[in-house]
Image (cartoon, rainbow, N blue to C red):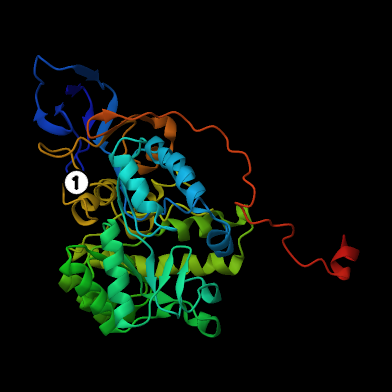
Amino acid sequence: MSIVIEGANIIDGTGREPFQATVTIDNDRITSVGEGGGSNEDERIDASGLTLMPGLIDAHCHMTFDEPSSNDELFFHRREGLAAIIAAQNVKKLLNAGVTAFVDPDCIFDVGVDLRDAIEANVIPGPRMLCGGNALLTSVGGTAGRLIPDEGLRGYAKIVSSPEEIRTEVRRQIKIGVDWIKVHVTGLLPRQSIRGEIQAWSLDELKLVCDTAHELGIPVMGHCRNAESIRDAVLAGMDMLLHATFMDEPTLELVCEKKVPLVPTFTFQANLADYGEAVGADPGLQNVFRKEIEESAVQIRQAYEAGVPVLCGTESGFSITPYGDWHYRELEVFVRDMGFTPLEAITAATKACGEHAGFRGDTGSIEPGKLADLILVEGDPSKDVTLLGNPDNIKRVMVGGKSMPLDPLPPREPINGWRTSQYSSGILTKQRAKDI
């Protein structure tokens, strides 16, 4: 199958200024970017007035969670079979938003592996996908406090304690086919929450995870939200860091030296800080997340200027970051809060993810030999990245040279027991009743 796309304004994902060229695709790959296509093409696309660019890559998207509003809902109100069916529908929303590839760091049950395999086998349409299994936690927990048990599995979390448990779980996940191992390096303790997240793993434990995974050829990513955790994750040999906020100067120097890719994932915080009142968010929590962006944006920008790869990820999959709506938002935050140019932000969401999020540089840019994961867009995102947030501007999405369906999903009806029942937003005391 040969396709020629002509007349488009091209943003190639490398940071180069937009230019005019004709792009030729044979089967699933780009074969030329130049003056004209061949004469034997199967399809010729007139893209005059549109922008052709690499599809967005979301390096942090929880595809199996289905937008919970609480950890309680996520941990106790999900069923494996239904989670898989719903994820197969939700993943289509990413295509509608111009996402042609994504990384799912951790999943409930083992649904992520099954979803990826179904997409790769053309059972369902979807973006290119890489996945982790269950996030590795110690009994200290992650961000869910006492909802995390001292052992076993809960939601996306597998609790491991001894070196033997760590080795066994890493090997189990690799056996079932994960692309990444994820470690929740930091967690929240109820009596110490004012300190923010604290490190929940020792350096030796982190090294054991990395050594075990690397021996079997699988990379490791870490959820890190303080300086000590970032330092030890880097020293342990992790291949990518999610969040990487609240660095101190020595940690920043180490990150710059080792060039470990960072995925700040500010979209969740930005949505809660900017729009939280629309969903009844606590103002104090809004300020906490606003502060995280403000305090960490400068350091991550410094890392970027020192040559550290900085990637776009949105944490889509929660009620604050529903699928299909916010995959462009990280680019907006990069421009607004970290001083990226629109072209730099686009590179962070395309070529940088293609090279450093596990795709081996096979996607993320418009260059000969790369996979033809492309989108045609109304307008010029090199001047305004928020154009990518309007689905009406996404005119065509191609994954491996195949045009993907962009049909909107029908509205969903309530599913019994799937959402947490919330029958009040406060305690109905007699005094509150009298005040009505």
Residue occupying the point 24% across, 37% down:
373
Q: Can you name the residue that lies furthest to the top here?
A: 39
* Residue under the point 22% across and 77% down: 236
* Quarter assignment of residue 139: bottom left
Measured along the vertical axis of the image, is residue 68 above or below residue 262?
above
Q: Is residue 279 visible?
A: yes
Of all residues, the one furthest to the right in this rendering is 434
Work out which quarter of the rendered image holds the N terminus and state it: top left
Please tell me which residue lies in front, 408 or 244.
408
Q: What residue is shown at x 74% (from left), y 57% (from top)?
A: 423
Q: Is residue 208 left or right of residue 154?
A: left
Q: Quadrant of the C terminus?
A: bottom right
Res 218 quadrant in image: bottom left
Placement of 136 over or under 362, stated as above or below: below
The residue under label 1 is: 15
Q: Is residue 434 left or right of residue 197?
A: right
In the figure, 43 relative to 129: above or below? above
| Mark 1, other Cα within 10 Å: few <14 / some 14–19 / many ≥20 | some
Give the percent coordinates (x, y) of residue 23. 15, 28
Decide if residue 68 is on the left or right side of residue 165.
Answer: right
